[in-house]
């Protein structure tokens, strides 16, 4: 859906995003001449990062995690969650309770990955900020010698077993418009495909021969700029 949010709604959410505080790293002080380091468990780490912008260690971009299983979602996100249920994107018995917000500077993307088994097999992503990108779905290729990549984004883990080369062709492309568009993928697309936004490029063209779902002829030039994504899932 290219215009899932109105321009007014998009601007209101962007204004709210600016109010999210940054996560501040706390370093343990000296203790009798030694440094005391308290190791936190996963839930403590999640609670500490929840609702704050955090810069990823493995990438330059910032993320903000809102985990509704820890505390209630902010009202602006809860309204969007309710809307996604109302339009049938999520079943009422499994509404989205987990929102991961990614801030992408021009040219930044994300490697091929799956969202993993921690969530129900449904993901909805809203794009804001004005920039368009090409979202790609790749079939997962299971090889005995495939390398498993895991990286953590504020307690949200993504895994990828996909080996992608320039010779491979995605199963599907979709132009994500940064004007409040919505993309939803479930079931086979969630379980048996990796999704990606290519990194390190400022512009690219959609594939030919009907690969791009909302650009059937293909060959459209998409210029990359600033973008924020809001990804809604139901955490088990």
Image (spheres, helix red, strand yellow):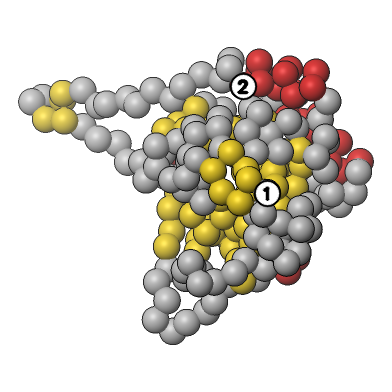
* Residue 162 in view: yes
Q: Quadrant of residue 69?
A: top right
Above/below status of 167 relative to 219:
below
Residue shown at 59% from the left, 33% from the top: 227
Please indicate whether residue 36 sits to the left or right of residue 66 in the image: left
| Depth order, front residue of 188/92 | 188
The number of discs equals: 2
Residue shown at 16% from the left, 23% from the top: 30
Determine whether the residue tagged by mark 1 lies in a helix, strand or loop. Answer: loop
Q: Point out residue 43 in the picture as x, y percentages from the top left corner.
A: 50, 42
Mark drawn on residue 17: 2
Q: Residue furthest left?
A: 33
Which mark is first along the chain, 2 or 1?
2
Please indicate whether residue 152 sits to the left or right of residue 58 in the image: right
* Residue 70 in view: no
Q: Which residue is mark 1?
A: 220
| Depth order, front residue of 43/198 | 198
Q: CA distance from mark 1 to mark 2?
A: 31 Å
Disc nearest the viewer among 1 and 2? 1
Q: Point out residue 58 in the picture as x, y percentages from the top left corner.
A: 37, 45
Residue shown at 52% from the left, 59% from the top: 112
In which quadrant is the N terminus drawn? Answer: top right
Residue shown at 61% from the left, 21% from the top: 17
Above/below status of 174 relative to 35:
below
| Depth order, front residue of 162/211 | 211
Mark drawn on residue 183: none
Badge 1 local density, few (<14 within 10 Å), some, or many (20+)? some
Badge 2 local density, few (<14 within 10 Å), some, or many (20+)? some
Q: Quadrant of residue 37?
A: top left
Determine whether the residue tagged by mark 2 lies in a helix, strand or loop. Answer: helix
Q: Point out residue 34 in the picture as x, y percentages from the top left corner.
A: 11, 30
């Amino acid at each position: 859906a290219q215009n899932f949010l109105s321009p007014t709604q998009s601007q209101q959410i962007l204004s709210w995003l600016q109010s999210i505080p940054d996560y501040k790293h706390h370093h343990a002080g000296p203790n009798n001449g030694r440094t005391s380091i308290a190791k936190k468990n996963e839930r403590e780490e999640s609670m500490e990062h929840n609702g704050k912008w955090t810069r990823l260690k493995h990438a330059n971009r910032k993320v903000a995690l809102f985990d509704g299983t820890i505390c209630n979602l902010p009202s602006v996100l809860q309204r969007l969650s309710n809307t996604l249920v109302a339009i049938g994107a999520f079943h009422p018995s499994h509404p989205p309770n987990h929102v991961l917000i990614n801030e992408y500077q021009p040219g930044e993307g994300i490697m091929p990955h799956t969202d993993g088994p921690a969530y129900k097999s449904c993901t909805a992503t809203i794009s804001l900020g004005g920039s368009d990108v090409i979202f790609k779905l790749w079939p997962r290729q299971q090889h005995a010698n495939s390398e498993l990549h895991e990286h953590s984004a504020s307690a949200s883990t993504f895994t990828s077993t996909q080996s992608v080369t320039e010779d491979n062709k995605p199963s599907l492309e979709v132009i994500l418009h940064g004007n409040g568009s919505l993309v939803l993928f479930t079931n086979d697309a969630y379980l048996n495909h990796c999704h990606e936004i290519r990194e390190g490029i400022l512009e690219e063209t959609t594939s030919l021969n009907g690969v791009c779902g909302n650009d059937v002829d293909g060959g459209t030039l998409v210029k990359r700029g600033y973008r924020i994504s809001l990804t809604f899932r139901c955490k088990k």
